[in-house]
Image (spheres, grey):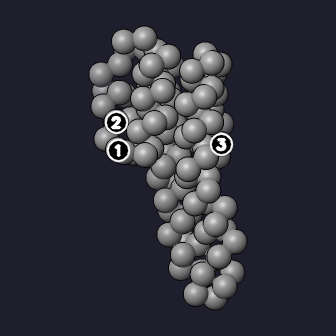
């Protein structure tokens, strides 16, 4: 499979299978770039959901509401940016976890 479409599928998986698809691509792909992106996508989803849960807890005290809004928007917007970048053929790292790799 072309790495361009592999990247698009990994980014788009955030909307239908955020954990399963990156793991499958990591195990099945022989391309280092696809493996790196699948790990980034998996870590990004894990970190963002953790931040959403923490923000939801702090929403009880009204402190977490702005963070909950920002993190929820990021869960929707960041994969779309990744899809567009993958379709354009440019290299792109996920925010927060992209520099960990």
In percent of width and height, residue 73 lies at: 62, 56
* Disc 1: which residue: 17
The secondary element bearing badge 3 is classed as loop
Alpha carbon of mark 1 to alpha carbon of mark 2: how far? 6 Å
Q: Residues within 10 Å of mark 2 (few under 14, many from 20)?
A: many
Q: Nearer the viewer, mark 3 or mark 1?
A: 1
Q: Eyeballing the image, is 30 above or below 75?
A: above
Q: Pointer 1 and pointer 2: residues touching (CB < 8 Å)?
A: yes
Q: Quadrant of residue 78?
A: top right
Q: Is residue 7 visible?
A: yes
- Residue 7 is situated, as x and y percent measured from the top left of the image, at 48, 24
Which residue lies at the image location 64% right of the left edge and 66% below the top edge? 69
Q: Check the image and report above or below for 28 versus 47.
A: above
CA distance separating discs 2 and 3: 19 Å
Q: Which residue is mark 3?
A: 95
Residue 72, quarter of the rendered image:
bottom right
Q: Mark 2 falls on what kind of element?
A: helix
- From the top left corner, tell me how far across and down residue 12 is, in percent: 45, 36
- Give the camera-side residue of 8 and 29: 8
Q: Is 13 left or right of 101, judged from the image as shown?
A: left
- Counting residues from the N terminus, which is met first, the one under dot 3 or under dot 1? 1
| Quadrant where the image shows the C terminus | top right
Image vertical order of residue 100 relative to residue 30, above or below: below
Q: Residue furthest bottom?
A: 61
Q: Residues within 10 Å of mark 3 (few under 14, many from 20)?
A: few
Residue 80: percent from left, percent from top: 57, 38
Q: CA distance from mark 3 to mark 1?
A: 20 Å
């Amino acid at each position: 499979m072309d790495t361009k479409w592999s990247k698009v599928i990994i980014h788009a998986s955030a909307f239908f299978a955020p954990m399963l698809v990156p793991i499958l691509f990591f195990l099945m792909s022989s391309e280092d770039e696809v493996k790196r992106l699948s790990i980034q996508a998996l870590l990004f989803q894990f970190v963002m959901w953790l931040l959403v849960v923490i923000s939801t807890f702090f929403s009880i005290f009204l402190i977490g509401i702005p963070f909950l809004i920002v993190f929820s928007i990021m869960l929707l917007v960041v994969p779309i940016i990744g899809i567009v970048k993958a379709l354009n053929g440019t290299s792109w790292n996920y925010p927060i976890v992209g520099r960990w790799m």
